[in-house]
């Protein structure tokens, strides 16, 4: 847990993935910094793609463990 809090890019990707997989809009990105914002948007895109492919709820748990 502490490692994740220190690595802001990994945390941004994870939060973006969670936002995308739950169907939130990409305009809700909380970051202004270019690199961290890009990681959040990359996670968001992957989360949205997984949502469209049906990896939501219980069927998507194994995907979240990877990130």
Image (cartoon, rainbow, N blue to C red):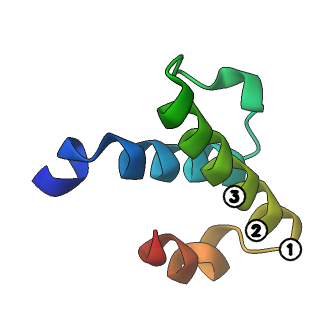
Residue 1 is at least partly visible in this image: no
In the rendered image, which quarter is residue 1 located in?
Answer: bottom left
Q: Under tag 1, what secondary structure?
A: loop
Circle 3 is placed at which residue position?
Answer: 47
In the rendered image, which quarter is residue 8 located in?
Answer: top left
Circle 1 is placed at which residue position?
Answer: 53
Circle 2 is placed at which residue position?
Answer: 50
Tell me if mark 1 has few (under 14), some (14-19) or many (20+) residues whose alpha carbon lies within 10 angstroms of its own: few
Q: Under tag 2, what secondary structure?
A: helix
Most distant residue in the right direction: 52
Looking at the image, residue 27 lies above or below residue 62: above
Alpha-carbon distance for marks 3 and 1?
10 Å
Left or right: 65 as drawn, with respect to 25: left
Question: Which residue is rendered at x = 82% and y = 74% of the image?
Answer: 54
Is the Cβ of the residue at disc 2 closer than 8 Å to that at disc 1?
yes
Most distant residue in the top direction: 32
Is the Cβ of the residue at disc 3 closer than 8 Å to that at disc 2?
yes
Q: Position of residue 20 (x, y in %)?
A: 70, 48
Alpha-carbon distance for marks 2 and 1?
5 Å
Q: Position of residue 33 (x, y in %)?
A: 49, 21
Q: Of residues 66 and 51, which is closer to you in this image? A: 66
């Amino acid at each position: 847990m502490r490692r994740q809090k220190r690595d802001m890019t990994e945390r941004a990707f994870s939060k973006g993935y969670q936002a995308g997989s739950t169907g939130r809009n990409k305009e809700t990105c909380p970051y202004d910094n270019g690199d961290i914002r890009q990681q959040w948007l990359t996670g968001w895109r992957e989360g949205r793609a997984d949502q469209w492919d049906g990896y939501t709820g219980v069927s998507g748990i194994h995907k979240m463990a990877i990130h």
